[in-house]
Image: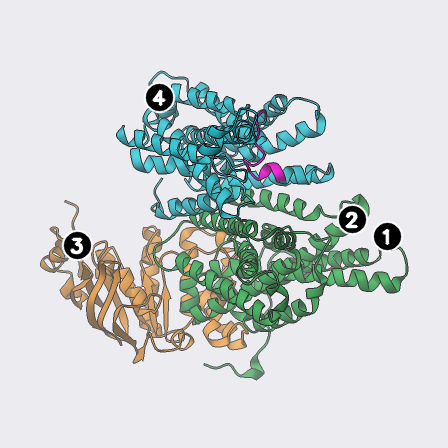
Chain colours: A orange, B green, C cyan
């Protein structure tokens, strides 16, 4: 369970995240949605201790993220941001191996190796495992980073816009994979999403933010509702039920 | 989840391109090691006149000094590039060695020329390093916390800071009496021919201490090179580690500047060469490769210039020239991407 | 207009002050009480007046050269010392000193100017190779190019045992200026006037090649004119005074903050403020450590790099 209380972040005089309190259930997929500038990514960064907060507390599985030693937290929670620019020239296997760093501090055990192979297999990266990251396509690189995060083997996996720069096929593949990780491995997955239809299709729980504040939250089925969505996005959004799934239409 | 020590086995390095039976990084290290050894042997033996009992200790001291400089510059540059997560910034480009010269000048300026001799050297060095760490801390905070800055802005600001420090040093020197000015002026031009060998023992001890601390952190370097977010995600105590590394870097810059004076591009040269020769960013290869390259450049270069061409003070000029070319190349290649 | 008049009056006041600062006692009293052959009058005629003129001429010319350069390169942060121009001029002067030591200063200056032109052209050529032009990349490349050219120069100076002279002329200093040792600087005045006459062309060129061509001007020709002015000024100031870093950068930028970028309006401002700024720095350098002098390049280097840092840091990160 992730519990946030009164989480606030200011940049100069502007308040980016303004007293957000909420409880995210353990297990399943939770999507954070909302218009640009709602403070979604900042909020996610504070949950994952990448960014300090000006006020409030966050606990993940009972651990206060600002007080728990970083390496302890690294075995409970992992975070993947959208910009993964790096200067280091690494192979896919190198990168995935770093997922074991919180456990082995660079000295890999046989068990670590097994985990690395599993993660590489889980994301179908076997053929690419000795290729350098800068030789891969955007989608392949994204998969390598997700493999690293899975290899980190944490109960909580946080992802900031994991579908960015992915085409339809890869975006679908990524979401299916996260779904599998939640179902098969029992992970709690929290992600920031822009595409509300992906959120509708794949998440169990949806949190909406607007202007730095919590706008609404609830099970996916309740959140994907014309009235709720229209309030969040300040525009008319129609919701249709197609084959048992709720699909939003907002193109005119 | 804690691994059983009994099952701890080294995992083979990723299968990158192999040359013969060796992996490419190992092969490169071997070749560089051989070149460094040849350079050292030539440096010690070529053109020796007079008795060996004089020549060997005399050249040995110089060799040790050059080695310490190569080591300090190479290690400080690679680590600085790791924490700043880019391949163009180096401590000297960001004005660190100019700052060291400025601190030296300021000591003479405010305490008088006698101060250089009478102050407790350890205390003085500690104070100098402290100022440099404070400066690098401020710089680092400004770079990485708060809004995103473009790399070009960072480099340019660093260079202009360097110019400011140099101008301020010159300014203070001019306000001194001409004697003090002459004493100080010597320390502002890099020269590998006239190394200050009186500092050798202290410098060796300091570099040794830095190395011990540095090796204990060895396992975090590769993680840090993934960038701040990833390093925190993987459980590195980011702030503390960065502060320690910047302290090590400051100490190393102070040592090399004290020994030979400021050399802007040497670090960039060896770090870039090491990265491109190895084809990997793993620190267990990059650090030794950069040090070996530094030794080949300094010791080998000095031998060639001194013995073959009889230009004994030109090495720093040549290094600055090549380093400048590499720098423009790196900047342009990055911009063209 | 009234402000400009104020600036001119201030500069004239500084110029008069400059005449009366120095080791020898030169004051209105000593001047009035002495004849034409007396020491005070001689010092005034041989040293003080030439020095003050040299300061005004080089200050105005360097500042305007910086402005012209910023227009033709279309970048706020270029000036002769951030584009390799000064260093190339220095290399040219060294080459002239080595190969044609007997030539008059004018001849050596022209060689230095042609090197400066070639160096600046090389700089522009390198910039052309970068498809994406970042504002800050331009001075960065320029400073580095300057460093490379400087290394070549240092190497030859070292080989021909001319390092002390090289250090001397890289360190701008007005203390050596006497009658007969500054007259080349009048060429700088000519260049300043030329820049003023062609001001509109440079303003137009500053808006880009397409814009210039659209208005029926020959872009190439404007560029060449600008670069010739910049190279001549750099060479003239280098051989007479030595290099004065950042002058051409800070003055035009400060003026631009005050009165905008129309060159017709800014050239007089830049010239007057350049002269006034150098006068003030020079007087400061003479007073602080009297009877010794602090060279102008050191004083301007300290102030100039601080202003440069201010200009860099006040720019929004992505502003172009």
Q: Secondary structure at mark 2?
A: helix
Image vertical order of residue B140 relative to residue B218, above or below:
above
Q: CA distance from mark 1 to mark 3?
A: 84 Å
| Label of residue C200 in the image | 4
For label 2, the crowd category at 10 Å Cα-Cα, with few meaning under 14, some 14 to 19 and many 20 or more, is: some
Q: Which residue is mark 1?
A: B47
Q: Secondary structure at mark 1?
A: loop
Q: Quadrant of residue C156?
A: top right
Q: CA distance from mark 1 to mark 4?
A: 66 Å
Foreground residue among C156 and B304: C156
| Badge 1: chain ID | B
- The lab-note entry on whether marks 1 and 2 share a chain reads yes
Q: Secondary structure at mark 3?
A: strand
Provide the residue span drawn in magenta. C168-180
| Label of residue B306 in the image | 2
Q: Quadrant of the C terminus of chain C?
A: top left
Q: Is residue B33 left or right of residue C175?
A: right
Q: Residue C151's x, y, as percent?
A: 63, 41
Q: Residue at x 9, y 58 (%)?
A: A227
Foreground residue among B252 and C243: C243
| Badge 3: chain ID | A
Q: Would residue C75 be seen by someone viewing this image from the given angle?
A: no
As drawn, the residue found furthest toward the top would be: C216
As drawn, the residue found furthest toward the front would be: C33
For label 1, the crowd category at 10 Å Cα-Cα, with few meaning under 14, some 14 to 19 and many 20 or more, is: few
Q: Which residue is mark 3?
A: A248
Magenta span dominant secondary structure: loop
């Amino acid at each position: 369970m992730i519990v946030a209380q009164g989480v606030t972040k200011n940049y100069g005089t502007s308040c980016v995240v303004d007293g957000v309190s909420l409880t995210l259930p353990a297990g399943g997929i939770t999507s954070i949605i909302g218009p640009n500038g709602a403070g979604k990514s900042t909020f996610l960064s504070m949950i994952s201790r990448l960014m300090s907060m000006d006020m409030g507390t966050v606990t993940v599985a009972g651990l206060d993220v600002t007080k728990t030693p970083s390496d302890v937290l690294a075995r409970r929670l992992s975070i993947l941001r959208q910009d993964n620019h790096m200067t280091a020239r690494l192979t896919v296997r190198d990168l995935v191996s770093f997922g074991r760093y919180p456990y082995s501090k660079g000295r890999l055990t046989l068990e670590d190796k097994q985990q690395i192979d599993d993660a590489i297999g889980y994301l179908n990266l076997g053929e690419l495992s000795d290729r350098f990251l800068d030789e891969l396509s955007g989608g392949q690189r994204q998969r390598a980073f997700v493999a690293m995060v899975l290899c980190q083997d944490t109960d909580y996996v946080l992802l900031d816009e994991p579908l960015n720069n992915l085409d339809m096929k890869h975006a679908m593949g990524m979401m299916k994979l996260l779904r599998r990780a939640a179902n098969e491995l029992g992970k709690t997955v929290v992600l920031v999403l822009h595409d509300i239809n992906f959120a509708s299709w794949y998440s169990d729980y949806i949190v909406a933010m607007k202007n730095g504040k919590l706008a609404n939250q609830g099970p996916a089925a309740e959140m994907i509702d014309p009235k709720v969505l229209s309030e969040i996005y300040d525009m008319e959004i129609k919701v249709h039920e197609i084959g048992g799934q709720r699909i939003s239409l907002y193109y005119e | 989840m804690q691994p059983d020590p009994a099952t701890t086995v080294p995992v083979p390095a990723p299968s990158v391109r192999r040359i013969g039976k060796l992996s490419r990084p190992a092969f490169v290290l071997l070749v560089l090691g051989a070149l460094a050894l040849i350079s050292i042997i030539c440096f010690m033996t070529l053109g020796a006149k007079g008795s060996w009992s004089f020549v060997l200790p005399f050249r040995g001291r110089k060799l040790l000094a050059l080695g310490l400089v190569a080591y300090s510059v190479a290690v400080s540059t690679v680590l600085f590039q790791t924490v700043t997560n880019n391949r163009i910034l180096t401590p000297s480009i960001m004005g660190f060695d100019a700052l060291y010269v400025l601190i030296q000048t300021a000591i003479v300026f405010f305490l008088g020329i006698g101060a250089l001799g009478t102050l407790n050297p350890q205390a003085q060095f500690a104070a100098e390093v402290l100022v440099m760490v404070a400066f690098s801390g401020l710089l680092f905070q400004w770079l990485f916390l708060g809004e995103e800055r473009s790399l070009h802005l960072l480099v340019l600001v660093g260079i202009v800071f360097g110019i400011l420090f140099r101008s301020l040093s010159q300014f203070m020197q001019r306000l001194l009496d001409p004697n003090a000015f002459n004493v100080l002026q010597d320390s502002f031009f890099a020269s590998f021919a006239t190394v200050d060998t009186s500092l050798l023992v202290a410098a060796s001890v300091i570099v040794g201490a830095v190395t011990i601390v540095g090796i204990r952190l060895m396992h975090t370097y590769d993680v840090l090179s993934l960038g701040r977010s990833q390093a925190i995600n993987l459980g590195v105590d980011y702030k503390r580690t960065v502060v320690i590394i910047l302290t090590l870097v400051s100490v190393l810059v102070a040592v090399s500047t004290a020994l030979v004076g400021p050399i802007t591009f040497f670090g960039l040269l060896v770090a870039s060469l090491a990265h491109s020769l190895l084809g990997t960013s793993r620190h267990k290869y990059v650090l030794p490769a950069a040090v070996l390259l530094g030794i080949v450049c300094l010791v080998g270069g000095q031998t060639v210039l001194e013995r073959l061409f009889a230009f004994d003070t030109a090495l720093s000029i040549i290094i600055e020239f090549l380093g400048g070319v590499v720098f423009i190349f790196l900047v342009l290649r990055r911009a063209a991407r | 207009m009234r402000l400009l008049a104020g600036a001119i009056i201030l500069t004239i006041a500084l110029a008069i002050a400059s005449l009366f600062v120095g080791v020898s006692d030169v004051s209105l009293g000593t001047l009035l009480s002495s004849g034409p052959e007396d020491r005070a009058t001689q010092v005034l005629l041989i040293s003080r007046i030439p020095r003050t003129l040299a300061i005004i001429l080089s200050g105005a010319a360097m500042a305007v050269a910086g402005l012209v350069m910023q227009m033709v390169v279309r970048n706020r942060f270029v000036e002769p010392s951030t584009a390799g121009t000064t260093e190339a001029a220095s290399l040219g002067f060294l080459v002239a000193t080595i190969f044609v030591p007997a030539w008059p200063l004018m001849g050596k200056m022209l060689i230095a100017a042609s090197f400066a032109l070639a160096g600046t052209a090389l700089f522009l050529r390198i910039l052309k190779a970068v498809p994406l032009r970042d504002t800050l990349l331009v001075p960065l490349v320029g400073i580095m190019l300057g460093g490379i050219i400087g290394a070549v120069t240092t190497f030859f100076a070292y080989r021909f045992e001319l390092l002390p002279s090289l250090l001397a002329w890289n360190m701008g200093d007005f203390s050596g200026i006497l009658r007969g040792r500054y007259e080349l600087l009048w060429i700088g005045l000519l260049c300043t006037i030329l820049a003023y006459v062609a001001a509109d062309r440079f303003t137009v060129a500053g808006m880009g090649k397409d814009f210039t061509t659209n208005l029926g001007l020959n872009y190439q020709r404007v560029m060449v004119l600008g670069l010739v002015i910049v190279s001549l000024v750099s060479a003239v100031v280098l051989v007479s005074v030595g290099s004065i870093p950042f002058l051409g950068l800070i003055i035009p930028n400060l003026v631009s903050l005050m009165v905008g970028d129309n060159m017709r309006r800014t050239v007089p401002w830049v010239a007057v403020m350049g002269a006034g700024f150098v006068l003030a720095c020079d007087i400061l350098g003479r007073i602080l450590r009297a009877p010794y002098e602090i060279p102008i390049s050191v004083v301007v280097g300290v102030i100039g790099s601080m202003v440069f840092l201010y200009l860099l840091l006040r720019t929004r990160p992505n502003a172009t």
